[in-house]
Image: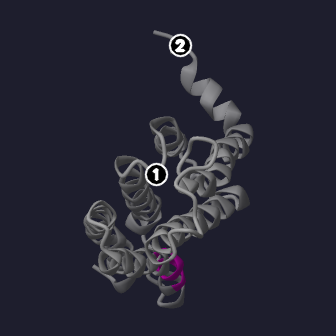
Amino acid sequence: MNIATMVTLSRVFIAPFFAYSFMYGYNHQSPTFIWIAVILAGLIELSDLLDGTIARARKEVTDFGKVGDPVADSVSRQTVFLSFLLSGIIPLWLYLVFFYRDAFMQLLRIICASSGVVLAARKSGKLKAVLQGIATFGVLLVVLLKFYSPSTIPDSIAGFHPGFWVMLFPALYTLLSVIDYIIPNRTLIVNMMKKKDS
């Protein structure tokens, strides 16, 4: 196993520790555990930033890395968003936007692979990852501000936790980004749906 692959897999192993730290800190009003969650979120984002760079620099680009990188992204981010859901920060429907988008993208990768096509990353996908990362730290900041300066952050805005509003735009962009992947691959998708001749 090369270094780039270990960096990729590291965020899969870090994610459950983030979930535990964040949920324990949030439910038990412990800023210390939220700070630990901040550090772990930073390590997840750093892993996502570095694995591809390391693979190219060390000429360690592998088929496993090409497949494992988006899967590791999905697993780690879904774990973060699930933590926000279970803590009551975001509603179920908002979480499902992230979940179903990732599920669809995995399906699209399988469709492309079955036709011998590698689903290339697009700018919309990269921007989606950036927005989700920023939103993650935005929610963590909101939670910390509630601990240290309760009057700064209201308990709710229009009936939703303030963290919901931090996550809303990235969720909408995440949903719309799917279109950017469907359009250039629509022919493959349509062909996969056609009935095969006996």
Q: Residue furthest top?
A: 198
Q: Residues within 10 Å of mark 2 (few under 14, many from 20)?
A: few
Q: Is residue 101 left or right of residue 178?
A: left
The disc placed on residue 195 is 2
Location of mark 1 (residue): 89
For label 2, the SS is loop
Q: Nearer the viewer, residue 119 or 9?
A: 9
Residue 28: name its quadrant.
Answer: bottom left
CA distance for labels 2 and 1: 44 Å
User: Is 36 or 97 nearer to us in this picture?
Assistant: 36
The residue depicted at 55 percent of the width and 26 percent of the height is: 192
Q: Position of residue 2 (x, y in %)?
A: 33, 82
Q: Position of residue 60 (x, y in %)?
A: 44, 82
Magenta residue span: 48-53
- Decide if residue 170 is on the left or right side of residue 96: right
Assess whether residue 58 is covered by the magenta stretch: no
Q: Nearer the viewer, residue 189 or 133?
A: 133
Q: Amino acid at mark 1?
A: Ile
Disc number for residue 150: none
Give the crowd class for mark 1: few <14, some 14-19, many >=20 residues within 10 Å. Answer: many
| Drawn side of residue 193 relative to residue 12, left or right | right
Is 50 one of the magenta-colored residues?
yes
Q: Type of residue at label 2? A: Lys
Looking at the rendered image, the quarter that the N terminus falls into is bottom left
Rendered position, 94 above or below 54: above
With respect to residue 87, does 4 lie above or below? Answer: below
Q: Nearer the viewer, mark 2 or mark 1?
A: 1
Of 18 and 182, nearer the camera is 18
Q: Residue furthest bottom?
A: 58
The answer, for residue 91, to whether it is visible in the render is yes
Q: State which tag comes first along the sequence, 2 or 1.
A: 1
